[in-house]
Image (cartoon, helix red, strand yellow):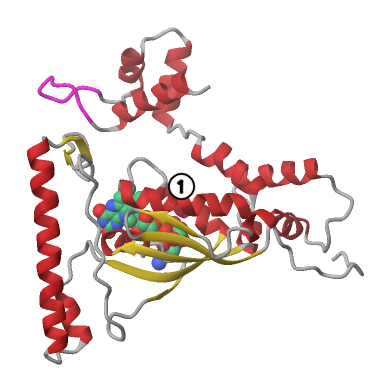
Amino acid sequence: MAESTAPMVRSSVPAADRLIGVKLPVLEHGYVVLVDYMGSDAAIVQAARVSYGAGTKTVRDDRGLIRYLMRHHHTTPFEMVEVKFLLRLPIYVARQVIRHRTANVNEYSARYSVVPDEFDVPAPGSVRLQSTRNRQGRGDPAPPEVDERFRTDLERLCSDAYRVYTAALEAGVARETARMVLPLAYYTEWYWKIDLHNLLHFLALRLDPHTQEETRRFAAEMAKIAQAICPIAYEAFEEFTLAGLSLSRREQRAVRALLDGATPEAACRTAGLPLVREDGKPMSTGEGVEFLEKLSRLRATS
Ligand SMILES: Cc1cc2nc3c(=O)[nH]c(=O)nc-3n(C[C@H](O)[C@H](O)[C@H](O)COP(=O)(O)OP(=O)(O)OC[C@H]3O[C@@H](n4cnc5c(N)ncnc54)[C@H](O)[C@@H]3O)c2cc1C
Protein backbone atom coordinates (compact mmCIF):
# COMPACT_ATOMS: atom_id res chain seq x y z
CA MET A 1 0.00 0.00 0.00
CA ALA A 2 1.27 3.47 -0.89
CA GLU A 3 2.37 5.57 2.06
CA SER A 4 2.47 9.35 2.22
CA THR A 5 4.17 11.78 4.52
CA ALA A 6 1.82 14.62 3.51
CA PRO A 7 -0.20 15.93 6.47
CA MET A 8 -3.89 15.02 6.46
CA VAL A 9 -6.18 17.98 6.08
CA ARG A 10 -9.92 17.92 6.73
CA SER A 11 -11.52 18.59 3.37
CA SER A 12 -13.77 21.59 3.26
CA VAL A 13 -15.80 22.90 0.36
CA PRO A 14 -16.54 26.66 0.53
CA ALA A 15 -19.86 26.32 -1.35
CA ALA A 16 -21.01 23.69 1.15
CA ASP A 17 -19.66 25.59 4.16
CA ARG A 18 -21.81 28.55 3.14
CA LEU A 19 -24.90 26.30 3.32
CA ILE A 20 -24.28 25.00 6.84
CA GLY A 21 -27.12 26.09 9.12
CA VAL A 22 -29.08 27.73 6.29
CA LYS A 23 -32.78 26.80 6.22
CA LEU A 24 -33.84 25.90 2.69
CA PRO A 25 -37.62 26.25 2.91
CA VAL A 26 -39.90 23.51 1.61
CA LEU A 27 -43.71 23.73 1.74
CA GLU A 28 -45.21 26.18 4.19
CA HIS A 29 -43.51 25.08 7.41
CA GLY A 30 -40.79 22.66 6.31
CA TYR A 31 -37.10 23.02 5.60
CA VAL A 32 -33.87 21.26 4.81
CA VAL A 33 -30.70 22.29 6.63
CA LEU A 34 -27.17 21.07 6.07
CA VAL A 35 -25.87 20.46 9.59
CA ASP A 36 -22.47 19.06 8.71
CA TYR A 37 -20.62 17.02 6.15
CA MET A 38 -17.46 14.96 5.92
CA GLY A 39 -15.51 14.57 2.70
CA SER A 40 -15.78 15.95 -0.80
CA ASP A 41 -15.01 14.91 -4.35
CA ALA A 42 -11.41 14.66 -3.19
CA ALA A 43 -12.35 12.03 -0.59
CA ILE A 44 -13.99 9.91 -3.27
CA VAL A 45 -10.92 10.13 -5.46
CA GLN A 46 -8.62 9.52 -2.52
CA ALA A 47 -10.50 6.36 -1.53
CA ALA A 48 -10.55 5.13 -5.10
CA ARG A 49 -6.82 5.56 -5.41
CA VAL A 50 -6.28 4.16 -1.93
CA SER A 51 -3.65 6.78 -1.26
CA TYR A 52 -3.35 9.98 0.73
CA GLY A 53 -3.30 13.47 -0.69
CA ALA A 54 -4.33 14.72 -4.07
CA GLY A 55 -1.00 13.60 -5.54
CA THR A 56 -0.07 14.81 -8.93
CA LYS A 57 -3.39 14.14 -10.66
CA THR A 58 -5.17 16.96 -12.39
CA VAL A 59 -8.79 17.99 -11.81
CA ARG A 60 -9.56 16.50 -15.18
CA ASP A 61 -8.20 13.15 -14.03
CA ASP A 62 -10.33 13.32 -10.90
CA ARG A 63 -13.45 14.01 -12.92
CA GLY A 64 -12.64 11.15 -15.25
CA LEU A 65 -12.09 8.79 -12.32
CA ILE A 66 -15.35 9.78 -10.60
CA ARG A 67 -17.28 9.37 -13.84
CA TYR A 68 -15.69 5.95 -14.29
CA LEU A 69 -16.65 4.92 -10.75
CA MET A 70 -20.24 6.12 -11.27
CA ARG A 71 -20.56 4.40 -14.65
CA HIS A 72 -19.28 1.12 -13.37
CA HIS A 73 -21.18 1.14 -10.06
CA HIS A 74 -17.95 1.13 -8.11
CA THR A 75 -19.85 2.58 -5.19
CA THR A 76 -17.77 2.29 -2.04
CA PRO A 77 -15.61 5.41 -2.67
CA PHE A 78 -18.86 7.43 -2.60
CA GLU A 79 -19.56 6.03 0.86
CA MET A 80 -16.54 7.99 2.15
CA VAL A 81 -18.62 11.18 2.07
CA GLU A 82 -21.17 11.71 4.86
CA VAL A 83 -23.92 14.33 4.98
CA LYS A 84 -25.97 15.30 8.03
CA PHE A 85 -29.28 17.07 7.44
CA LEU A 86 -31.88 18.57 9.71
CA LEU A 87 -35.27 18.02 8.08
CA ARG A 88 -38.60 19.47 9.14
CA LEU A 89 -41.24 17.69 7.12
CA PRO A 90 -44.94 16.70 7.24
CA ILE A 91 -45.49 13.23 8.72
CA TYR A 92 -46.87 11.94 5.40
CA VAL A 93 -43.56 12.89 3.73
CA ALA A 94 -41.52 11.59 6.66
CA ARG A 95 -43.17 8.18 6.26
CA GLN A 96 -41.66 7.97 2.77
CA VAL A 97 -38.25 9.30 3.73
CA ILE A 98 -37.95 6.90 6.70
CA ARG A 99 -38.17 3.94 4.31
CA HIS A 100 -34.57 4.67 3.33
CA ARG A 101 -32.98 2.41 5.89
CA THR A 102 -29.41 3.36 5.18
CA ALA A 103 -29.83 6.77 6.84
CA ASN A 104 -29.18 7.32 10.55
CA VAL A 105 -32.17 9.09 12.03
CA ASN A 106 -32.88 10.86 15.28
CA GLU A 107 -36.42 12.24 15.48
CA TYR A 108 -38.06 14.96 17.55
CA SER A 109 -39.89 13.16 20.34
CA ALA A 110 -43.62 13.89 20.59
CA ARG A 111 -43.51 11.80 23.80
CA TYR A 112 -41.11 14.31 25.31
CA SER A 113 -42.14 17.61 23.71
CA VAL A 114 -45.37 19.27 22.65
CA VAL A 115 -45.99 19.16 18.88
CA PRO A 116 -46.22 22.71 17.41
CA ASP A 117 -49.50 23.66 15.73
CA GLU A 118 -48.18 23.53 12.17
CA PHE A 119 -49.66 21.43 9.42
CA ASP A 120 -49.46 21.24 5.65
CA VAL A 121 -52.34 22.41 3.46
CA PRO A 122 -52.03 22.34 -0.34
CA ALA A 123 -51.79 25.78 -1.93
CA PRO A 124 -55.03 27.07 -3.48
CA GLY A 125 -55.59 25.56 -6.90
CA SER A 126 -53.00 22.80 -6.40
CA VAL A 127 -55.29 19.92 -5.40
CA ARG A 128 -55.37 17.28 -8.12
CA LEU A 129 -57.65 14.36 -8.89
CA GLN A 130 -56.64 10.72 -8.60
CA SER A 131 -54.57 9.73 -11.65
CA THR A 132 -56.35 7.35 -13.99
CA ARG A 133 -53.01 5.96 -15.19
CA ASN A 134 -51.08 5.62 -11.97
CA ARG A 135 -52.84 4.25 -8.93
CA GLN A 136 -50.27 5.90 -6.69
CA GLY A 137 -50.33 9.31 -8.33
CA ARG A 138 -52.30 12.46 -9.01
CA GLY A 139 -53.68 13.54 -12.37
CA ASP A 140 -55.69 16.51 -13.62
CA PRO A 141 -56.36 19.59 -11.46
CA ALA A 142 -59.43 19.23 -9.25
CA PRO A 143 -62.41 21.47 -10.09
CA PRO A 144 -62.19 24.72 -8.07
CA GLU A 145 -65.05 23.73 -5.72
CA VAL A 146 -63.40 20.37 -4.94
CA ASP A 147 -60.05 22.10 -4.37
CA GLU A 148 -61.62 24.67 -2.04
CA ARG A 149 -63.69 22.10 -0.14
CA PHE A 150 -60.75 19.76 0.44
CA ARG A 151 -58.46 22.52 1.69
CA THR A 152 -61.14 23.97 3.97
CA ASP A 153 -62.01 20.53 5.38
CA LEU A 154 -58.34 19.75 5.99
CA GLU A 155 -57.77 23.05 7.81
CA ARG A 156 -60.85 22.50 9.94
CA LEU A 157 -59.90 18.90 10.73
CA CYS A 158 -56.37 19.90 11.76
CA SER A 159 -57.61 22.79 13.90
CA ASP A 160 -60.13 20.50 15.61
CA ALA A 161 -57.48 17.85 16.14
CA TYR A 162 -55.10 20.37 17.70
CA ARG A 163 -57.84 21.63 19.99
CA VAL A 164 -58.44 18.05 21.19
CA TYR A 165 -54.67 17.58 21.56
CA THR A 166 -54.29 20.74 23.65
CA ALA A 167 -57.33 19.90 25.79
CA ALA A 168 -55.94 16.44 26.44
CA LEU A 169 -52.55 17.86 27.48
CA GLU A 170 -54.28 20.37 29.78
CA ALA A 171 -56.24 17.49 31.32
CA GLY A 172 -52.94 15.77 32.08
CA VAL A 173 -53.03 13.12 29.36
CA ALA A 174 -49.52 11.93 28.54
CA ARG A 175 -47.99 13.60 25.47
CA GLU A 176 -47.32 10.15 23.97
CA THR A 177 -51.06 9.42 24.10
CA ALA A 178 -52.43 12.86 23.25
CA ARG A 179 -50.45 12.94 19.97
CA MET A 180 -52.61 10.10 18.64
CA VAL A 181 -55.17 12.64 17.43
CA LEU A 182 -52.80 14.56 15.14
CA PRO A 183 -53.22 13.99 11.37
CA LEU A 184 -50.44 13.12 8.91
CA ALA A 185 -50.36 16.76 7.73
CA TYR A 186 -48.61 17.75 11.01
CA TYR A 187 -44.85 18.21 10.96
CA THR A 188 -42.05 16.24 12.49
CA GLU A 189 -38.35 17.00 12.59
CA TRP A 190 -35.25 14.86 12.51
CA TYR A 191 -31.55 14.65 12.01
CA TRP A 192 -30.90 12.49 8.98
CA LYS A 193 -27.34 11.40 8.25
CA ILE A 194 -26.34 9.31 5.25
CA ASP A 195 -23.34 8.58 3.06
CA LEU A 196 -23.20 9.97 -0.45
CA HIS A 197 -23.72 6.63 -2.19
CA ASN A 198 -26.98 6.04 -0.36
CA LEU A 199 -27.97 9.72 -0.63
CA LEU A 200 -27.67 9.49 -4.41
CA HIS A 201 -29.75 6.30 -4.35
CA PHE A 202 -32.35 8.16 -2.28
CA LEU A 203 -32.27 11.08 -4.73
CA ALA A 204 -32.59 8.80 -7.76
CA LEU A 205 -35.83 7.42 -6.31
CA ARG A 206 -37.17 10.58 -4.72
CA LEU A 207 -36.44 13.07 -7.52
CA ASP A 208 -38.22 10.77 -9.93
CA PRO A 209 -41.64 11.93 -11.18
CA HIS A 210 -43.18 8.74 -9.73
CA THR A 211 -42.46 10.07 -6.24
CA GLN A 212 -45.05 12.24 -4.52
CA GLU A 213 -44.49 15.90 -5.38
CA GLU A 214 -44.06 17.10 -1.78
CA THR A 215 -41.37 14.47 -1.13
CA ARG A 216 -39.68 15.43 -4.38
CA ARG A 217 -39.49 19.02 -3.19
CA PHE A 218 -37.54 17.95 -0.11
CA ALA A 219 -35.31 15.76 -2.28
CA ALA A 220 -34.66 18.71 -4.60
CA GLU A 221 -33.26 20.81 -1.73
CA MET A 222 -31.18 17.88 -0.48
CA ALA A 223 -29.86 17.47 -4.03
CA LYS A 224 -28.66 21.10 -4.03
CA ILE A 225 -26.68 20.34 -0.89
CA ALA A 226 -25.19 17.14 -2.34
CA GLN A 227 -24.21 19.11 -5.43
CA ALA A 228 -22.53 21.79 -3.34
CA ILE A 229 -20.48 19.25 -1.39
CA CYS A 230 -19.49 17.03 -4.31
CA PRO A 231 -20.06 18.90 -7.59
CA ILE A 232 -18.13 16.43 -9.71
CA ALA A 233 -19.84 13.35 -8.25
CA TYR A 234 -23.20 15.06 -8.58
CA GLU A 235 -22.51 15.90 -12.21
CA ALA A 236 -21.69 12.24 -12.86
CA PHE A 237 -24.86 11.20 -11.00
CA GLU A 238 -26.91 13.51 -13.23
CA GLU A 239 -25.23 12.16 -16.33
CA PHE A 240 -25.37 8.42 -15.67
CA THR A 241 -28.24 7.99 -13.22
CA LEU A 242 -30.76 10.83 -13.44
CA ALA A 243 -30.45 11.29 -17.19
CA GLY A 244 -29.41 7.69 -17.89
CA LEU A 245 -31.75 5.22 -19.54
CA SER A 246 -31.73 1.45 -19.04
CA LEU A 247 -33.06 -0.94 -21.66
CA SER A 248 -34.42 -4.39 -20.88
CA ARG A 249 -33.77 -7.29 -23.24
CA ARG A 250 -37.14 -6.79 -24.95
CA GLU A 251 -36.54 -3.07 -25.22
CA GLN A 252 -33.21 -3.74 -26.89
CA ARG A 253 -35.04 -5.98 -29.39
CA ALA A 254 -37.46 -3.10 -30.02
CA VAL A 255 -34.57 -0.67 -30.55
CA ARG A 256 -33.07 -3.09 -33.08
CA ALA A 257 -36.41 -3.18 -34.90
CA LEU A 258 -36.49 0.63 -34.85
CA LEU A 259 -33.00 0.75 -36.33
CA ASP A 260 -34.28 -1.58 -39.07
CA GLY A 261 -36.98 0.98 -39.86
CA ALA A 262 -39.99 -0.29 -37.89
CA THR A 263 -42.50 2.13 -36.39
CA PRO A 264 -42.48 2.30 -32.56
CA GLU A 265 -45.72 0.31 -32.41
CA ALA A 266 -44.43 -2.36 -34.79
CA ALA A 267 -41.15 -2.49 -32.87
CA CYS A 268 -43.09 -3.12 -29.66
CA ARG A 269 -45.05 -5.92 -31.35
CA THR A 270 -41.86 -7.53 -32.66
CA ALA A 271 -40.21 -7.31 -29.26
CA GLY A 272 -43.23 -8.60 -27.30
CA LEU A 273 -43.85 -5.30 -25.51
CA PRO A 274 -47.63 -5.11 -25.10
CA LEU A 275 -49.49 -1.93 -26.03
CA VAL A 276 -53.02 -3.36 -26.40
CA ARG A 277 -55.14 -5.23 -23.86
CA GLU A 278 -56.83 -8.55 -24.60
CA ASP A 279 -60.13 -6.72 -25.20
CA GLY A 280 -58.41 -4.58 -27.89
CA LYS A 281 -58.27 -1.41 -25.80
CA PRO A 282 -54.94 0.50 -25.61
CA MET A 283 -52.96 -0.09 -22.45
CA SER A 284 -52.21 2.95 -20.28
CA THR A 285 -49.43 1.28 -18.26
CA GLY A 286 -46.98 -1.57 -18.65
CA GLU A 287 -43.71 -2.36 -20.36
CA GLY A 288 -44.77 -1.28 -23.85
CA VAL A 289 -46.10 2.07 -22.65
CA GLU A 290 -42.96 2.63 -20.59
CA PHE A 291 -40.80 1.88 -23.64
CA LEU A 292 -42.69 4.51 -25.66
CA GLU A 293 -42.13 6.93 -22.77
CA LYS A 294 -38.41 6.20 -22.96
CA LEU A 295 -38.50 6.99 -26.69
CA SER A 296 -40.25 10.29 -25.91
CA ARG A 297 -37.53 11.07 -23.38
CA LEU A 298 -34.89 10.32 -25.99
CA ARG A 299 -36.58 12.61 -28.50
CA ALA A 300 -36.71 15.37 -25.89
CA THR A 301 -33.04 14.98 -24.92
CA SER A 302 -31.06 18.01 -25.99
C1 LIG B 1 -42.33 5.78 -6.25
C2 LIG B 1 -42.25 4.91 -5.04
C3 LIG B 1 -43.37 4.23 -4.60
C4 LIG B 1 -43.32 3.43 -3.44
N1 LIG B 1 -44.44 2.77 -3.01
C5 LIG B 1 -44.39 2.03 -1.90
C6 LIG B 1 -45.55 1.34 -1.41
O1 LIG B 1 -46.63 1.43 -1.98
N2 LIG B 1 -45.46 0.63 -0.26
C7 LIG B 1 -44.27 0.49 0.40
O2 LIG B 1 -44.23 -0.19 1.42
N3 LIG B 1 -43.14 1.11 -0.03
C8 LIG B 1 -43.19 1.87 -1.15
N4 LIG B 1 -42.05 2.51 -1.59
C9 LIG B 1 -40.81 2.37 -0.81
C10 LIG B 1 -39.82 1.42 -1.52
O3 LIG B 1 -40.35 0.11 -1.65
C11 LIG B 1 -38.51 1.35 -0.72
O4 LIG B 1 -38.77 0.81 0.56
C12 LIG B 1 -37.88 2.71 -0.52
O5 LIG B 1 -37.85 3.42 -1.72
C13 LIG B 1 -36.46 2.55 0.01
O6 LIG B 1 -35.69 2.04 -1.03
P1 LIG B 1 -34.41 1.15 -0.76
O7 LIG B 1 -34.78 -0.06 0.04
O8 LIG B 1 -33.75 0.89 -2.07
O9 LIG B 1 -33.51 2.17 0.07
P2 LIG B 1 -32.68 1.98 1.40
O10 LIG B 1 -33.53 1.45 2.50
O11 LIG B 1 -31.95 3.26 1.62
O12 LIG B 1 -31.65 0.89 1.04
C14 LIG B 1 -30.64 1.15 0.06
C15 LIG B 1 -30.21 -0.18 -0.50
O13 LIG B 1 -29.59 -0.94 0.56
C16 LIG B 1 -29.98 -2.30 0.44
N5 LIG B 1 -30.72 -2.67 1.65
C17 LIG B 1 -31.04 -1.87 2.69
N6 LIG B 1 -31.67 -2.54 3.65
C18 LIG B 1 -31.78 -3.81 3.19
C19 LIG B 1 -32.36 -4.99 3.72
N7 LIG B 1 -32.93 -5.04 4.91
N8 LIG B 1 -32.30 -6.10 2.97
C20 LIG B 1 -31.72 -6.09 1.76
N9 LIG B 1 -31.14 -5.02 1.20
C21 LIG B 1 -31.18 -3.89 1.92
C22 LIG B 1 -30.81 -2.43 -0.83
O14 LIG B 1 -29.95 -2.72 -1.90
C23 LIG B 1 -31.37 -1.05 -1.00
O15 LIG B 1 -31.71 -0.74 -2.35
C24 LIG B 1 -42.08 3.30 -2.73
C25 LIG B 1 -40.95 3.99 -3.19
C26 LIG B 1 -41.03 4.78 -4.33
C27 LIG B 1 -39.79 5.51 -4.79
Q: Amino acid at mark 1?
A: Ala
User: Relative to residue 135, is residue 80 drawn left or right?
Assistant: right
Residue 26 percent coordinates (x, y): 38, 54
Dominant SS type (magenta): loop
Check disc 1 and report the residue beneath it: 204
Q: Is residue 51 left or right of residue 218?
A: right
Quarter of the rendering occupied by the N terminus: bottom right
Q: Residue at x 27, y 33 (%)?
A: 286
From this view, report whether residue 27 is shown above or below residue 291: below
Decide whether residue 9 is among the magenta residues: no
Question: From what the image shows, is residue 176 above or below residue 198?
Answer: below
Q: Nearer the viewer, residue 218 or 132?
A: 218
- Callout 1 secondary element: helix
Can I make out residue 102 in this image? no
Q: Please check the rendered image and state whether residue 276 is part of the magenta-colored stretch, yes or no.
A: yes
In the image, farthest residue toward the right: 5
- State the extent of the magenta-drawn residues as a range: 275-284
Tally of numbered tags? 1
Q: Nearer the viewer, residue 99 or 192?
A: 192
